[in-house]
Image (tube, helix red, strand yellow):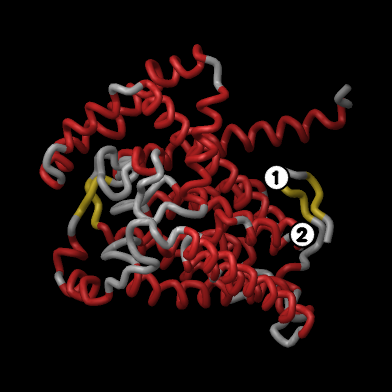
Amino acid sequence: MVGANQIPGIARRCAWLVFALLLAALVLTSFLRSWSLLDGNPRNGLQAYLDGSAHRPFAYRSLLIDATRSVEHTLPPSARSWLADAVAPQLYALCVEPWRARYDALYPGFGGVVDALWAQPAYRANYALVVVAMLLSLAVAILAVASSAAHLGCSTARTLGLTVYFALMLATSFLNGGYFYDFTEQLFACWLVYCAVTRRWGLFAVLLLLPMQMNKETALLMIFFVAPLIGSWRDRALLVKGGFLLALCVAILVTLWTVHAGAPGGVAEWHLPANVAFWRDPQSWLTASDMLASGVPLPRMTYLLLPVFGVIMALRTGVTPLFRTVLVAVAVLGPLMLLLGYRDEFRALNLALPLLVSAIAATGRDLASTGPSASVAPPLRQSVCFGAVRD
């Protein structure tokens, strides 16, 4: 039986779960209104992932799809019918129909391919399940962000504000592009930061080494992003452990490249000349698009206002070791985005979002006063999800 003294804690957890789901639903609606799952796209359409013919479809891309197909196969026929005939048509109206005219112009025969796909009940059911997986991934990521902020000493009100700030930044990073697997990547980035600030090193190692985290080269950089949160760079034991994990990550990545060497596409695509030409055009900075499912056209560079706000806030209240970690992360990711990202793929920078939110949570405290590892050893705090967190 649940004791009377446990009811407030259970109620708090339930309230946070509902809040995270609602916030995730808003972001996901924005994403799906701005960027569909690319039905009929010959390179990265959802069907291409379902049948294994997508462009370089390894690591967490295919694992999420494999899990989705496994769930679809285990569901009773009534549940599959409900997903295909009740849920999927609503998603079609939201995600696909607004894009049909645009994709018809880009891909000849696109409309016929989409019609053929959506005529298949199994495809409709899988489509709905992928959207559910995206929603749950983001909701759990939001809970990780909230728990990190609470552990760093934020009040409930400030924790709520920071989770909304995180959601806004993530939504605007999808203004001009994104894929379903970006939500899985964000989930792992958020939980890696949470494990670092709460010193859960066993879980940290597991999350870092999961093949889901090894698809993009930028995922490898997470170990550098969180290293300053762990302790001093002069700690030899830390350097040995970090070097071992980094070597293991590289080995996994090379193995994936080798196993999928015959898949379409290359290991990396270089877009520096196209990116330079794109950003030299003033229209690239001023072009507006519907953002946050609001119906209000905003310039694509609106995304940069949110991180700038975070920087100003940190400079006003004090630059902590955690915030310097964020600056390092962005300094590394920025050039990579320019080299490997295509045009305005700001989602390449959103791996640093959990760190940015944690940095804002930690500003105003003299975390450096008690040593190089003080930024990850605050007093015992109450996690919004898991109760007391002990160092």
Q: Amino acid at mark 1?
A: Val
Depth check: give the residue in front, 202 or 368.
202
Q: Is there any visible trace of residue 293 in the rendered image?
A: no
Q: Is residue 272 left or right of residue 17?
A: left
Picture layout, residue 345 above or below residue 35: below
Q: Amino acid at mark 2?
A: Gly
Q: Is residue 23 left or right of residue 202?
A: left
Q: Which residue is mark 1?
A: 384
Q: Secondary structure at mark 2?
A: helix
**Tag of residue 66:** none
Residue found 37% across the figure and 70% down from its top: 337
> In the rendering, at what x and y percent does residue 266 appear?
35, 65
Q: Secondary structure at mark 1?
A: loop
**Tag of residue 202:** 2
Picture layout, residue 258 above or below residue 237: above
Q: Is residue 202 left or right of residue 37?
A: right
Depth check: give the residue in front, 360 or 303.
303
